[in-house]
């Protein structure tokens, strides 16, 4: 009986052991075969670390490859409070090596619950070099260096208002940085690092790690039509104008009229995007595209070209200019600041900027016809240049909203609001023989291999585009150009814009500023000059606008010299051949006698 009992117990034990063995074998089979991949990946996960690979933000270049914006990396210092062993000693060591106050660091690293606290967003390379040996020796437990992206603008305030800036997250916040953000921003990747038992990470070439990498795609590079040298010329001229006349603001634009490519866009006040500490929202208002002004006498060449195109006047037709005072109605008079006795030919009306002469000729144009022409010249709607802030359409009211005086006011540049870009584009129609082209600021958007993404073409325009052909005929354009040449000769209002050796077609503008609720100011003016050179085969067109200058305020005295300075240097830089032998008067000649403010009295 005993033997049989022993056998039973032995059998039970054996059976239990057999079951356990089978369970173990089954478990091993499950681990090794059925669920091998699951547990293998779990094991790998315990020994790997996922590290984000930040994409490089695209660069911004000028037309010649000069860098205006680029991303760099700088070391940042941070701490894990849970790993810091002696906060006071650690803070003192950091101060010793970097100069960062221990009193500032200590509160940040004393709390073990603060697992990630930034001690310095951006350190110098020297500071980082001094810290690394101490960190390797474990003298600074819980203290880490991390490379962070930083946007750098090598040209400083050159084109700064237009380029804009990035925010702390390295995303475009203002200007072109914001407008082109979707192209400049790349796509981050990641890499898998191996981690040992001491939680140290290192790169592994094991296929299990390499196959899980995701390569970052860097942002696209944006190439502008801007020429750094021409931009420098323009900003220098604007700065000299500001120093002399103390205006509220000033700007200069330079364009290739045939293609619409903007070579320079100088705005004052200016801003250095590297100095973000002085940034104030709105600092990047692009006055050239968002601010409107009454163009004053510069609009007269547009009106003149319309009248010539319609066959309503000839350059030699003489018009009685009422000895400088035309009482249109009992309540409405138009005056010329400088009285030219007798009659003036239409060429002389443009040369001397006669308000009365232009207003009289304009009465021959039907209001609906005038409105249609102004629209075709580009007024009343954006030019299509994509910048931040968005372009203003300006002010061109429908004919139904015109007053009984509008046909007297609009021809001399009142009751209409334009941007500098619109005015330059309109005058470039004349330079182009009657064709309006779309201005462009971006030359191309490409990746690091020079390839353009298809979606980039929706951002801006990389090829010259004619928006309207035959706005005026080539003959009418040539005639008004002939009149504009007289503006910069010996007797013209803009002789200070004349350039020795070149034929300069231009027009001065001096308009009283309209103050809402008060009417036209007798103290604040907008001085401007717009033109193109050489007149017969224009290489460049340019506009200068000076808002509320102190002292002198005539466009021929305030803006014309800046036009000459910019164009003379730009023509030499571009290697444009001279096209005339006779030279205009020197700059030291007495101020011209024939400056005219575009003005009506109501």
Image (cartoon, grey):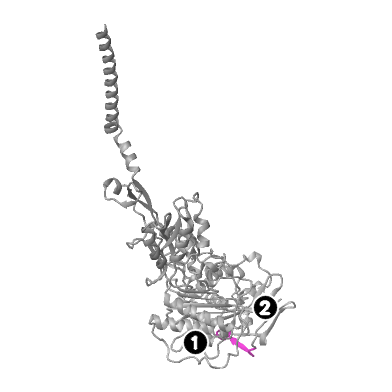
Query: 341 or 507, which lies in front?
Result: 507
Dividing the picture into quadrants, the one containing residue 337 is: bottom right
44 vs 108, left or right, is left
Taking 33 as reference, is 209 above or below it?
Answer: below
Query: Could you say where residue 399 lies in the image, as x and y percent from the top left?
Result: 63, 66
Taking 430 as reference, is 104 above or below it?
Answer: above
Q: Which quadrant is the N terminus positioned in?
A: top left
Residue at 53% from the left image edge and 93% from the top image edge: 588
Query: Could you say where residue 199 lies in the image, as x and y percent from the top left?
Result: 36, 48
> What range of the chain is rendered magenta?
339-349
79 vs 21, left or right, is right
Residue at 37% from the left image edge and 49% from the top image edge: 50
282 vs 85, left or right, is right
Q: Which residue is disc 1 drawn over?
A: 498
Q: CA distance from mark 1 to mark 2?
A: 29 Å
The numbered disc on residue 600 is 2
Q: Please check the rendered image and state whether residue 345 is part of the magenta-colored stretch, yes or no.
A: yes
Q: Is residue 277 in sight in this rendering?
A: yes
Query: Could you say where residue 190 lies in the image, as x and y percent from the top left?
Result: 36, 51
147 vs 44, left or right, is right
- Density class for disc 1 (Cα within 10 Å; few <14, some 14-19, many ≥20) is many
Q: How many marks?
A: 2
Query: 432 or 87, which lies in front?
Result: 87
Tag in front: 1 or 2 = 1
Q: Secondary structure at mark 2?
A: strand
The numbered disc on residue 54 is none
Toward the right, the furthest residue is: 330
Q: Secondary structure at mark 1?
A: loop
Query: 445 or 308, which lies in front?
Result: 445
């Amino acid at each position: 009986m005993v033997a049989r009992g022993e056998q039973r117990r032995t059998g039970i034990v054996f059976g239990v052991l057999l079951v356990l063995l089978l369970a173990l074998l089954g478990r091993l089979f499950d681990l090794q075969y059925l669920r091998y991949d699951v547990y293998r990946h779990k094991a790998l996960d315990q020994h790997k670390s996922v590290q984000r690979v930040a994409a490089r933000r695209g660069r911004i270049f000028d037309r010649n490859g000069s860098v205006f914006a680029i991303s760099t990396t700088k070391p940042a210092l941070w701490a894990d409070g849970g790993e810091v062993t002696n906060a006071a000693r650690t803070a003192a060591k950091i101060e010793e090596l970097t100069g960062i106050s221990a009193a500032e660091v200590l509160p940040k690293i004393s709390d073990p619950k603060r697992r990630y606290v930034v001690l310095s967003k951006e350190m110098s390379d020297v500071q980082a070099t001094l810290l690394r040996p101490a960190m390797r020796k474990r003298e600074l437990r819980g203290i880490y260096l991390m490379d962070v992206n930083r946007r750098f603008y090598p040209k400083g305030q050159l084109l700064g208002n237009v380029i804009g800036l990035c925010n702390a997250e390295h995303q475009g916040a203002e200007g072109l940085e914001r407008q082109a953000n979707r192209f400049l921003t790349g796509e981050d990747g990641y890499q898998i690092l191996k981690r040992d038992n001491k939680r140290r990470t290192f790169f592994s070439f094991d296929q299990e790690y390499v196959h899980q990498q995701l390569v970052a795609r860097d942002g696209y590079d944006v190439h502008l039509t801007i020429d750094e040298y021409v931009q420098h010329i323009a900003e220098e001229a604007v700065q000299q104008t500001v120093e002399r006349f103390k205006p509220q603001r000033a700007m200069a634009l330079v364009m290739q009229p045939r293609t619409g490519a903007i070579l320079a866009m100088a705005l004052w006040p200016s801003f250095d995007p590297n100095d973000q500490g002085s940034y104030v929202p709105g600092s990047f208002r692009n006055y050239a595209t968002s601010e409107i002004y009454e163009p004053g006498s510069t609009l007269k060449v547009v009106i003149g070209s319309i009248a010539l195109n319609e066959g309503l006047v000839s350059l030699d037709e003489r018009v009685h200019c009422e000895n400088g005072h035309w009482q249109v109605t009992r309540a409405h008079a138009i005056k010329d600041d400088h009285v030219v006795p007798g009659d003036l030919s239409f060429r002389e009306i443009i040369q001397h900027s006669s308000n009365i002469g232009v207003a009289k000729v304009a009465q021959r144009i039907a209001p609906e016809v005038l409105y249609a022409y102004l629209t075709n010249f580009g007024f009343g709607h954006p030019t299509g240049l994509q910048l931040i802030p968005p372009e203003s359409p300006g002010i061109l009211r429908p004919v139904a909203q015109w007053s009984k005086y509008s046909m007297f006011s609009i021809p001399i540049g009142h009751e209409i609001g334009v941007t500098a870009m619109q005015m330059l584009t309109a005058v470039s129609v004349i330079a182009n023989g009657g064709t309006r082209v779309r201005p462009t600021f971006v030359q191309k958007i490409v990746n690091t291999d020079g390839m353009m993404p298809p979606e980039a073409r929706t951002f801006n325009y990389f090829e010259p585009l004619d928006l309207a052909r035959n706005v005026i005929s080539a003959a009418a354009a040539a005639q008004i150009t002939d009149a504009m040449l007289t503006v910069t000769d010996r007797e013209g209002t803009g002789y200070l814009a004349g350039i020795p050796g070149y034929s300069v077609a231009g027009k001065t503008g001096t308009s009283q500023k309209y103050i809402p609720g008060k009417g036209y100011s007798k103290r604040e003016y907008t001085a401007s000059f717009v033109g193109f050179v050489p007149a017969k085969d224009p290489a460049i067109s340019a506009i200068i606008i000076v808002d509320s200058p102190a002292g002198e305020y005539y466009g021929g005295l305030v803006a014309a010299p800046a036009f000459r300075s910019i164009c003379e240097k730009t023509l030499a830089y571009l290697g444009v051949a001279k096209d005339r032998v006779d030279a205009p008067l020197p700059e030291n000649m007495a101020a011209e006698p024939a400056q005219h403010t575009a003005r009506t009295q109501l």
